[in-house]
Structures are given as structure tokens and as C-alpha cells.
Image: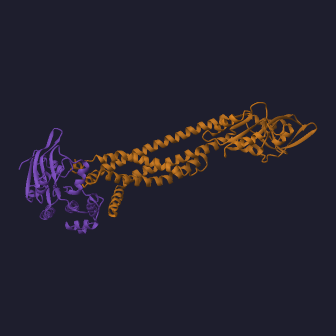
Chain colours: A orange, B purple
Amino acid sequence: MAASRQITRRLLWRALSVRNQRVWVVFFALMVSTAIVNALVSVYFDIDIKMSRELRTFGANFYLGPAHGHTLPEADFDRLVSAAPPGLVAAGSPYLYGTARSELENVALAGVRFSALPALVPYWQVEGAWIGVDFDDRNAMIGRTLASRLNLAVGDTLSLVKDGQKKALRIKGIVDAGDASDSLLFISLELAQDWLEKPGLMSHALFSMMNSAGNVEQFAAALRTGHADWAVRPIRKVSANEGNVLVKIQGLMGLVSIVILLLSTLCVNTSLTAIVSERQREFALQKALGAANRTIVRQVLLETLAISLAATVVGCLAGFVLAQVLGQTVFSASIGLRAWVLPITVALSLSAALGAAVLPLRRIMYIQPARVLKGE
Amino acid sequence: MPEESRVTATSAIEARHLSKHFGNVAALDDVSFSVAKGEFVALMGSSGSGKTTLMNLLTCLDTPTAGELWLDGVNAAGFDEEARRQFRARHIGLVFQQFHLIPYLNALENVMLAQHYHSVTDEASARRALEEVGLAHRVDHLPSELSGGEQQRVCIARALINEPPLLFADEPTGNLDAENEARVLEILQGLHSEGRTIVMVTHNPALGAYAQRVVRLQHGRIMQ
């Protein structure tokens, strides 16, 4: 039995080693396709997170406001955050709008949580500095248009006045947002609630959420059924685009993977057909000596599997490197190594190899030893 | 006495009204002959006489269109592919004109390959078989490192390794020089003297003279 296994191993090893040119063609075809498929599958599963991060630089993508009236309790902000699945909410801030008198003229102000602004409005161009603390009631940020009108620069002081009260605010940053924010004065939410005499209230809240696989839309739908007093909606210009782009990119990657697998299948099929053709006499002799079709088919399958496994192992390693190159080039970030990507890649590559072997193996079964050995 | 037993007792090979047709062409037409156990028979005929077709039937590489073919006491005419394969592995030794050795296996491994498809491999007996044909010093050589005569002797060792009752040689010296031809014929005669049944296909009358009896074919029929 051991000697039989030995001759099987010798047949396998010698058959591979003497045809190294064709074996290398099969190896490289499978290795390259495995590497590309592995890289694309890795990026495929990582791209929703990467794309979500990229697109969230366009700002908030979720809105919470009152269904009726003009304000909501600030506590609703925290209720929404608690109701969200873990990891969904990346950043958020309540907004309270109102008008206040300053020493110079009336100004429109917005109370916000300063710490959330860099994540919520990352596209703001700020002269000076962001305010990092939510309860900072000595500093303010001001929109470019308003600052020009009031002739204010970073470091200047603007005083709000009301019923004999006066609140001096130092301008820490001037905001260039390119939208209505350019005409607003941004102060801390607590100060706005106090000054506008709307304690514990907000006009609305904006959130930046991780939008993978359309889960922002699902979350909004879930909130709508349980909270009649809330108006909730994804901000479609970001979320919808995000979803569409993702679907298209993932579809494109799936298509490219299929085309590459088909091409490698064709290449392997051509090489295996050539190998079988070259070894016709060998197989005919084996049959003449009493080898069953299944024995020869098993032998060639073993050879194909040996090449495929070696190509798959090297291809997976190369694919991981390729995924990192793609990640750094496109997203400037590394692509995570996911355990389930490997079995998917291995299954796809081995299926391609075995699919390519079907016709050559059928050809072996129809070899007629009498004809081939006579050289017909 | 039952028919099968009668055949087994008297003949190694018995063909009865054997025919092989390829479409409308009769390659073999109503051929009947027998080979006794231990007999050395030469199968002769010109090109297109049906030698190869008859050889393919006798070695179970093909099936007849009609007739009976008793080989070593068994009617092989009705064998399916699997039965023919098993019969070849157990009862038939084949020596080819073109040797047909696996190019990437050495002499020893080529001989062991026949054992592998028969039952189990036994390296010691494969070495002995090569010794018997004078190749003890060439066991580790690849076919490309052997002369034509040496390759044919490996082929004979492979044909004999499973001790088949029937040995078929198809133009065994067709690719050999005079010296190697004589050596191969010497081996075949030695095997015959040990009592082995041998059928040799040849078109060479000088070679046919080495056999005990010559069966001549012409246009798919036995001439004598």
C-alpha cells in the first residue's frame, strides 16, 4: 500500500516537474486571478466603510426635527443616539436657532455642541480656530459674511445685549462654509438656550452616520414608526449618492472578478488541454496496462489541485498586498484582513481551476488506447 | 463436459467466427483459430490484412462485432470496458513496437507501474524482472538514457511482472538493430521454453520462423 502511494506520488511529482513550462502557465494564470479576486473581494467588503468615511466629509447625513412646531426637547437628541445601533452615529449636535441683539446690530445665532462640528461640517474653512469644548460660553465662531458686515476679525469681541444684560464673546474662528452658515454666529448650545430663553430645547439636530448597506435609511424608517412627534430623514444628497456609488462600485468589482475568473479558467483550460494532448500516449499506455478511467482522472485532478493550491496560497498573499496598494491609492487607508475573504477566494479560484479541468478530463476518458498506441 | 471447461482445458486462445466491422468495412471476417497453452504463435500478414485489428481484440483493447473469443478459459467477446480493463491487468502482458515507456519514470518505476494497476507494487520483484532481462545496472535510468534494445527489454519486464498467462508482442523488434533484435528474440524464446503462451505480430518472415506456428491473415481472413 505504501509502495502504491509512493508510485502515485512519483507520478504526480514527475508529471509536474517535467512539464514545468505549461505547469508554470497554469500556476501564474491561477495565481494572478486569485490575487486580483482576493484584492477585489477584500476591497468589496471594506469599501462601504471606506466610502462612508469619504462621503461623510461632505457633512451631516441625517436630520432630526420637530414634526409639528419649531422646537424639540434636547433630550430627544440623546434618545435618538441611544436608539441607534452601536457604531452607527459618528457625530451629532443639536442646533438651536434664534435672533439676538448685539451692540452693533441684530444677529442670527445658532447654539451648537462645538466638539461635534469638525465631524459634522468638515468642509468648513476656519480662519482662527475651532472651539473644542461644548460649554465654552466665552468664545464664539462667526460666519464670514456676518463677520465682514460687523467688521470683526479673529480675536475681536462681540457683545450680545438683552434687558440690561451684556454677554461679551471673543471671536475664535471665522467660518467660510459657502452656505447660510456664513451669516450665523455660533455659540454654545447652553448659552443659546439661556440667552434665547429656550431651556432644554433645540430647533433640530444633525448627525453624521456610518451609511453601510443602506442602514441609515432603515434606521430612519424604524424611528418614524415609533416617534410621531419627530421628523427624521436621511439627508439624501449625501446618503442616497453614497448608496448609489457603493452599489455601482461593488457591482463593477464583482463584474471585474467574474471576467478575471473566466479569463483564467480559459487560460487554464487551454493549458490543461495541451497537457492532456501531449500526454495522450501516456494515458493510453496506462489504460492498456489496466488503469481505470477514474484512476487516470484522479491522477490528473491531483496534479491540477496541487498546482491550484500552490497558486491559491501565493495568490492570496499577493492579493492581500494588492488590496493594501488599492486601499492606499484610492482611500489612503489600509484594507482590513477579513477571515472570510480567504475561503471565498479559495473557493472561487479552485472552482475556476476545476471548471477548467472538466473538458480535458472528459477527453482523457475518451482516449482509445488501441488507436493512440498505434499512432493513429 | 461444459463448453467453457473444454476450451479452458485445451486452449489459451480460441477465436470462433470472429468478425470486426468498421461501418461497412470488414476488418476481420469470420476468423477462427486457436492457440494452445504454452504455444508460440506468429501472426503474420501484409499491411491492411487485419493483424492489428485481431491483436486489439486478442488483447482486449477492442470488442468484436460478432463471434466468440475465449481467452484463458473466459469468453471475452461480451466484456464491457471495465471487464476488459480488469482482464488486461490480470491476464495479458503487452510488448509494443514503440516500447511506450513513461518518459519521466525510470526503468524500475515503469515496471512497477504495471504492478500498480494490477494490485500492489513490489520493488524487489520489479528489480528481479529487470535483472532477468539483463538490466540490473539500468534500473534508475530514464527511458531517454536507454538504448532502443534496453527500452524494449524494460517493456518486456513490464509485460511479465504480473506473470500474465498470455503474452502479446506487436512487432517487438521493429525498431531495433540486428543485435538487439537477436537479444529480444532470445528472451521471447526463453519465455516460451518456460511454458508461456506467446502471440507475436510481425510482417517479417525471418522473425516468424522463430515461432512454433504461423497464422497468416489476408484481407481479414485466416489463410492457413
Horizontally, is A345 left or right of A108 in the view?
left
Q: Is residue A40 above or below residue B174?
A: above
x and y, in percent, of residue A260 in the image: 46, 44
Residue A335 or residue A95, whichever sits in front: A95
Residue A48, percent across and down? Answer: 60, 43
Which quadrant of the structure image shows residue A15? bottom left
Residue B215: tell me if it is visible.
Answer: yes
Q: Position of residue B134 (x, y in %)?
A: 20, 67
Q: Name the residue rendered at 9%, 58% in the picture.
A: B211
Return the residue found at the far front: B1
Q: Is residue A363 left or right of residue B200?
A: right
Pinpoint residue B196: horizontal percent, then vertical percent: 14, 61
Q: Is residue A159 left or right of residue B27?
A: right
Residue furthest out toward the left: B224
Residue that lies at the very extreme toward the top in this rendered image: A68
* Residue B220 seen in the figure: no
In the displayed structure, A336 sits above or below A250; it is below
Q: Is residue B93 left or right of residue B105?
A: left
Total marks shown come to 0
Q: Residue furthest right?
A: A164
Q: Nearer the viewer, residue B215 or B83?
A: B83
Q: Which sits in the foreground, A50 or B210?
A: B210
